[in-house]
């Protein structure tokens, strides 16, 4: 059994925990921005292929307590048998994360850890591997929190939020795919309800909802970091093959309910259309150019309205644009209050979002969750309208 660490966005830990429970992982524990568990190679493979909300699957190699100084860290790393995983034919890189510890410079921490790897291999009479920061055979991850150091091996490679369908398409404020999937999971975005995103941007929320509804695994077709390990356990290849077969067996061919997405900005419609095609969903999704308030007005009964609303953080001192944005929120709230038997999930960092939308009094139930959009604080709001 291995100890695994699955990093994720702050506030979305519950989603990763649920995914690991479904995979039958053991000893699941939540931490800030990470979920830990134990499992065999099958959990490593299945989590990489099937997880929608985690950003990586890290395999713990060593855990050290009482590390207070640089000398403590160097002495601890000297005990790690790097030679069991790395030789002169391989390449490696170091990623360092420092929180409230003796060091504050992550680049220096990575350099010093790299030296420790090479020193250990030299002391063992092994050849010197090369450093490749872009696409290494092995990526070691050092996490130093206070006096606890964890050294892990990245099994994933490119982060799991990089599904591939947004390559080359940049939105003004793109939402990571893993955050979009987490928003849908946290808010219970029922795939049997007709779905509408009236401010779709690059279409991420609608695409992730379609992938959920079709039960299409986000890692179904991608390659993972562990596939580049020259010394990987033979069981890992079999576990990956089984995970991919499982993913294909779960897939559905038809959406259980229609998914609509729209935006008023032509560039957003073009970007979303490109992403839909890249995700292989053109037969299921079509992005239209419609004003958000008009789109909501045609949502119909039992609708699920989900959107990442404009935050307004870039407006600065532009009073006119701020007032326009506040007017948009108010009018959108009016249109949403007119819906019947609808679930509304809105993600926003606007400080007055709840007040401006004014949905609380009309809602049968209401909830909200603190999240982040990159470095910006935000909230996910849910209202169930009668």
Image (tube, rainbow, N blue to C red):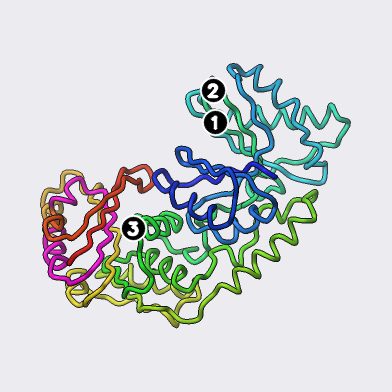
- Quarter of the image that includes the C terminus: bottom left
Horizontal side of 375 relative to 85 (left or right) equals left
Q: Position of residue 219 (x, y in %)?
A: 57, 63
Which numbered disc, 3 or 1, marks the residue that appears first in the sequence? Answer: 1
Q: Which sits in the foreground, 373 or 358?
A: 358
Label count reads 3
Q: Position of residue 182 (x, y in %)?
A: 41, 55
- The part of the image, by quadrant, that contains residue 74 is top right
Q: Position of residue 28 (x, y in %)?
A: 54, 44
Residue located at (20% from left, 77% from top): 298
Viewer-side label of 3, 1: 3
Residue located at (52% from left, 62% from top): 163
Q: Identify the residue under disc 3.
A: 187
Q: Is residue 257 covered in magenta?
A: no
The answer to the question of whether label 2 and label 1 lie on touching residues, with beta carbons closer than 8 A, is: yes
Horizontal side of 53 relative to 114 (left or right) equals left
Q: Is residue 338 covered in magenta?
A: yes
Q: Identify the residue under disc 1.
A: 106
- The part of the image, by quadrant, that contains residue 364 is bottom left
Q: Which sits in the foreground, 104 or 54?
A: 54
Horizontal side of 139 relative to 194 (left or right) equals right
- As helix, strand or loop, the secondary structure at mark 2 comes to loop
């Amino acid at each position: 059994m291995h100890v695994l660490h699955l990093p994720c966005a702050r506030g979305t830990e519950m989603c990763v925990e649920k995914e690991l429970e479904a995979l039958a992982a053991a000893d699941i524990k939540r931490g800030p921005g990470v979920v830990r568990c134990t499992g065999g190679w099958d959990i490593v493979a299945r989590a990489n292929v099937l997880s929608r909300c985690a950003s990586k699957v890290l395999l713990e190699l060593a855990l050290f307590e009482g590390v207070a100084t640089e000398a403590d860290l160097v002495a601890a790393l000297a005990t790690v048998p790097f030679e069991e995983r790395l030789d002169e034919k391989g390449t490696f890189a170091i990623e360092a994360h420092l929180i409230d510890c003796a060091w504050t410079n992550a680049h220096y921490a990575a350099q010093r850890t790299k030296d420790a790897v090479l020193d250990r291999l030299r002391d063992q009479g092994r050849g010197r591997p090369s450093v490749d920061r872009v696409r290494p055979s092995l990526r070691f991850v050092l996490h130093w929190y206070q006096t606890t150091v964890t050294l892990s091996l990245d099994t994933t490679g490119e982060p799991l939020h990089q599904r591939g369908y947004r390559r080359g398409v940049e939105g003004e404020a793109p939402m990571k795919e893993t955050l979009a999937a987490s928003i849908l999971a946290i808010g219970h975005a029922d795939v049997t309800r007709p779905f509408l995103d009236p401010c779709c941007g690059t279409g991420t929320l609608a695409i992730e909802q379609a992938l959920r509804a079709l039960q299409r695994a986000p890692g179904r077709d991608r390659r993972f970091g562990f596939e580049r390990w020259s010394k990987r356990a033979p069981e890992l290849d079999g576990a990956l093959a089984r995970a991919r077969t499982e993913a294909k067996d779960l897939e559905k061919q038809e959406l259980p309910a229609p998914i609509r997405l729209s935006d008023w900005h032509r560039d957003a419609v073009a970007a979303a259309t490109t992403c839909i095609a890249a995700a292989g969903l053109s037969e299921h999704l079509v992005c239209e150019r419609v004003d958000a308030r008009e789109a909501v007005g045609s949502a119909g009964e039992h609708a699920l309205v989900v959107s990442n609303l404009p935050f307004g953080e870039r407006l600065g001192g532009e009073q006119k644009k701020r007032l326009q944005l506040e007017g948009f929120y108010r009018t959108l709230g009016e249109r949403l209050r007119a819906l019947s038997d609808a679930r509304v999930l809105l993600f926003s960092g606007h400080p007055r979002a709840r007040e401006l939308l004014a949905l609380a009094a009309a809602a049968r139930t209401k909830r909200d969750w603190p999240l982040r959009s990159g470095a910006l604080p935000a909230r996910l709001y849910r209202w169930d309208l009668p």
